Image (cartoon, rainbow, N blue to C red):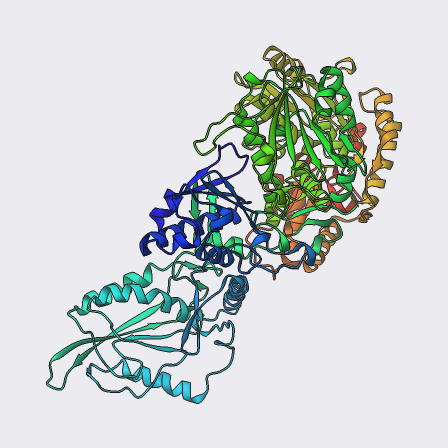
Amino acid sequence: MANRESQLLVRLYTNYPDTVVDIGEILLGEKHRKKIASDNLKRQQNDFSIAVCALLNSGGGIVRMESKDRNYSFQKDGIGQDIEKILRDCIGGNKTDEYFTWMQQGSNLLLFVKTWSCGDLEQGNAATKPRLCSLSTGMFYRSGTSVLSVSSGEAANFLRMKKSSANCCSENELSSKKARLSLGEGARKTHRNIQEHDIQDAVAEFIKRDRLLAGEVLDFTETTHIEFKEYSTKHILKYVVKTLPKYVSAFANTQGGYLIFGVDDNSRVTGTHGDVEKEALEKTVATTINSLPVHHFCGSGAGVQFQTHILSVYDKEGCSSGYVCAVHIEQFCCAVFHGAPESWMVTGHTTERLSVSKWTKLMTAADPDLSDLADRFRTELSLARSPPLTKPVYSNIGLQCAAELQGCLYPVGSDEIKWMPETLCTDLFSEYPGLEDVMRGQLRGLTKGVLIFSRSWAVDIGLWKEQDVVCDALLVAENAYPVLYTVVKDASYVRSGRCRETARTLKQKLVNDGGYTSKVCVIPQILQLNAANDQMEVVVNDVPWQEAPYDYTSLYPRDYILSSRDIPAFLQALVIVVLSFKSYLSDRLGCEIFNLLTRTQFELLSKNLHKVRKLFVLGLPGTGKTIVALKIMERIKNTFHCSPGEILYICENQPLRDFVGNETCRAVTRAAFLKGNFPEVKHIVVDEAQNFRCDEGNWYQRAWSMVKGRGGVLWVFLDFYQTTYPCACGLERSEMYPQELLTKVVRNATQICNYMFNLMKNILEAGNIPVPCEVLQDLLNQAECAHSLPGDCIVEENMESNELAAYVSRQCKSYLEKGYPFGDIAILCGTVSSAEEFRKVLQPELQRQIRKCRVRKVLGLAEDVSKDVIVLDSIRRFSGLERRIVFAIHPYAPQTEIVLSLLLCAVSRANTKLHLLYQKERYF
């Protein structure tokens, strides 16, 4: 099967903006399929099953098959009952029209496959189906004297019970033999009754015998723990290899037991009916069992434990009649598979059978436990009714949810097509006369929906932009297919394949990232600006089975047209696709997407980078400057087709540099930038620039001259209220243009936010920051808390040094007991030296308070912000980072002019809980 799987052709670049799996020529129609030879029929059924399963698990697509009979008619001949059965088996039900739509095009029959989803829209978040489409799970269990397959619907619960059982054994230091796991009616958590115990004793005595008599009847029978198998062939070793895996999986997954070869169903000894050596039999058993795939939840690397007992069999004359082979299989701690599950996904240009580990991970995937974060985040997209590759999505409770953001960004007109965003439309129509008329020509007959413009939808979804593209516009309208228009000046310079790739990728992201579960397509169309008669380009014919260029709307079935019910779900999925970003909490909580951009942040990111080559973003604490900096680097990469070495991220401290450094850019500190040589760099993003210094050189002049000479982009992010060095940052006021402001605080709870606002008023009144006060005043005038998220802001004063350590330790213990992890806590001191001193005082007290927590490392540094440890470091080294709970320990600086700014920097690092602690005397 593996060889056949690798031969299935996955076409990513066809005239369809979709994933197409090509299974080649087959006979179609019931009357024809009955005439196919058995081997050929099985091959076709196997290929078809794999293609359908792979597309269901990969966001949907098209299965293409070519009829061998050129006179075949889908309307007259139908498909074939075996194919219909495969479709029912794939979805585990009879409602095939929910997932599949057929369409004939010439001699080709196309099956349009919708994404698999584990819940139904009408049932809210209730998961009614498994996470994956699987034709078989590869796992078995014992039920009485029968071996049953673990069904796809039972698999997730079965595996979770295995995991729970393994964890209990690990915690209580029990052997895996004592663990008990049940599934269905056949294996319940009850003690064996006396008859079963007697049978077990009888088997134990039986395997001690050194010889058996052919034909003798054993004094025990088959039970849940015993199975007899008569050698039914002279090819004994092949029979053992074929038979063992299923029974080993069943016994190991239940309560263990004996598989005895050479005994019939009537408990009569028959022996081996052919020549076989004892050593070869033992080796075959061991090789077969040791090769079985297993999945561990307990951390053990052990395989299935077993013992093989070979008993000699003789006839009445004393002549050898071969052997009885009794294999004792012990109960396994976790899960044992007969073979890899029959479940596939599309990977690149092939269909890939999922490994045991990947399949198990996807089948048991669930929303992370966010009970300790319930006061901060709401679920936007749950796994309970999502496609297989979807990740959970969350947004801040106090901010706009996905539905509200959709209403703001992509409002649907009740009796019109709304053109959004309005400001971008105004800019584009001014820059490109005639664009508005070209687009209006595409909307004839449509009365409800939204037309969403973008400088480049390719860049919006993480792809490279075609340089000759004027703009893109996504039409989402009632009673129409979704259409992605690409407007160009000269269609001859635009590769139609890239437009199809953008449409295909957008469709996949709507499903796999945005969680859209209805039938969906995105049809690409190229429009040439200022062409005669508003010319619309149709993609050229570049695939053998596409017979002639024609209107794209004829390519998809009518049930792919959007209804009024589909549009809100489509647009909310689109919001998640374009606004999602990854926070530092993502890795710890196991979800790749953990937040949504605000509308202001998204609008800032939507600027035309070809025109806005230089920009200064002035932001207040907690407004998401670093997040925007990371996202703008992604857009620079895709807009200008950059390698990571061509984009430079500069910041002041090393922990932030290490946190940001990724595949998108090269990250350095200011000091390293001034000392280094960067011949490849074309674009620069500077973060936390208010704390840059000029004592080692003018960083700004070097950065600007570098990107200006190379036609690049320079964006600088600053927060003057958090200036923590008593010196100028190297920027003149006249240089800081053009400017954009970020003034909506999204990161901090309201109590912390109010404390920050008061601090900023005091900083403004003190007048110690070397920046014109009107700049600071303008920022403060526009400052607002963008939510109503509650939190704590606790101030304690006049504490002795030992009181500080005791207080922090008690509070940390309390938070841990409430379910907060170590990775939610940061302890920040005024300087590095004071942090080192406080560590010496705190560590023994903290260890005493939390001695029940068996962890190797409790305290870490700012560099460990992504790890599950309590960060203890200086305020400056933690700049640009965040934690949910922050203890600010006597935030003092020798330079009195920056004390308030240093305090603000510490306070703004806390998301929801702040403890501001002061000493009686200054030790740090």
User: 500 or 606: nearer the eye?
Assistant: 500
Q: Residue visible at 40% across and 73% down?
A: 256
Tell me residue 859's x, y (percent).
61, 48
Q: Residue visible at 68% across and 34% down?
A: 627
Tell me residue 823's x, y (percent).
64, 48
User: 227 or 410: nearer the eye?
Assistant: 410
Tell me residue 528's x, y (percent).
63, 19
Q: In this view, does 599 lie to the left or right of 466?
A: right
Instruction: State which quadrant residue 314 falls in.
Output: bottom left
User: 793 or 891: nearer the eye?
Assistant: 793
Q: Residue visible at 84% across and 40% down?
A: 755
Q: Is residue 111 left or right of residue 402?
A: left
Tell me residue 1's x, y (percent).
35, 51
Name the image quarter holding the C terminus.
Answer: top right
Number of marks? 0
Instruction: State which quadrant residue 817 falls in.
Output: bottom right
Instruction: State which quadrant residue 894 falls in.
Output: top right
> Quick check: can you spot residue 660?
no
Measured along the vertical axis of the image, is residue 249 above or below residue 705?
below
> Quick check: can you spot residue 363?
yes
Measured along the vertical axis of the image, is residue 470 above or below residue 93?
above
